[in-house]
Amino acid sequence: MLFPSVLSIPGQGKRWKLRHLFPVIFETFLLNWSRSVPDIKVSSVDAFLEYLEKERGYSHHSIRNYGTDLYTFCKYLDDYNNVGMNDFRSVKKTVIRNFLGHLMEEGLADTTVARHLASLKSFFKYLMRAEEISMNPAANVKSPKVKRSLPTFLEEAVVVKLLEMPEKEKSWLGGRDSAILELFYSTGIRVSELVNLSIGDVDFDGMLIRVMGKRSKERIVPFGKRAHHALRRYIKERENRLGSLEKSDPLFISNRLKQIATRTVQDRLTYYLNQFELSEEGEKFRGIKWSPHTLRHAFATHMLDRGADIRAIKELLGHASLSSTQVYTHLQVEQMKKVFVQSHPHA
């Protein structure tokens, strides 16, 4: 284990930010060991996390991952390399490789090990620009090969059945959930983007939404007639129950009338998926891992199936690079091969 269970919180450095970004991890295991870590290392990581937030506009989720990875590395240095490594200038390529090997011995997945290495590469690149080190020891370290899994493929008819599930709910939550699922499938936005939408982000006349994506990049995404109808119906019912709405009000709220949480969206989707799997149409999908991203994948693959340009899909999804979007073309090929094997007499 890299972290002891009994720790004490130091008063040096910028712990207030880490307490804000890591509320659960902070109180359990992430930082309390840091009195035993030279503060110069902790301060460098703190400064890097602040840079990611203020200069690069990274999300709290991304910053949390960077912080976890880098503090894991700091602890490794002090546990296994206590030979004068009071700062990062002493770190060599062999230390990075040994650290990755240690993570593998701990049983971490290749994807997690690769993420740790990516975090270290970014961190040491930052230290070079800040002239704290003269070379990046992680720059030429090879990442473990990660097999890229293809997203779950859902036929259009299956998605239609899934989107009908909230209509069976008799409470106002059914109307809200119907609007959520329709908007997911109509726009392909991320769950983190959906929960942060406000009333003012929706242009009902133009059938457009303003989305704040990763690294605070704003984009405009159109939505279709079914999503428009579901949103109108949900907003009308909400106004009838709670009165008129302001543009700054959250678009989707919980049963406590607060901005809906990511976990709530995931739980509601799981609920409807469980209901769907119990139906005759959903029987063959039992055991498949579902998530809000499933509808994002369906959005992209179905648009490709109907001839959409992959560059346009890239912009709609908010991908930084085309390579992230091209996974859906691979999915198309795999699905075509599956259909061929099942249907062609000479397959």
Image: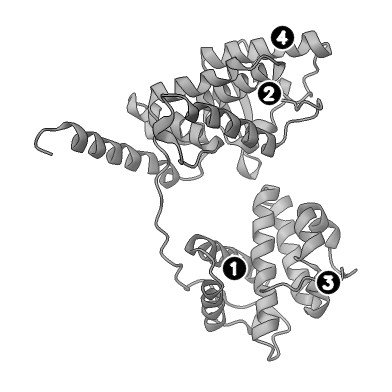
Q: How is the image coloured?
A: one colour
Does the image show residue 312? no
Identify the mark at residue 120; answer none if there is no mark.
1
Q: Residue furthest left?
A: 346
Q: CA distance from mark 2 to mark 3?
A: 44 Å
- Which of these two is toward me, 224 or 123? 224
Helix, strand or loop status at disc 2: helix
- Callout 2 touching callout 1 (CB < 8 Å): no
Q: CA distance from mark 3 to mark 4?
A: 51 Å
Where is mark 4, residue-wise?
236
Where is mark 2, residue-wise?
201
87 relative to 339, above or below: below
Residue 132 rendering spot, x and y as whole percentages: 69, 75
The total of numbered circles placed on residues is 4
Q: CA distance from mark 3 to mark 1?
A: 25 Å
Tag nearer the camera, 2 or 3: 3
Q: Which amino acid, by three-letter code, is at mark 1?
A: Leu
Q: Which amino acid, by three-letter code, is at mark 4?
A: Lys
Where is mark 3, residue-wise?
7
Q: Quadrant of the C terminus?
A: top left
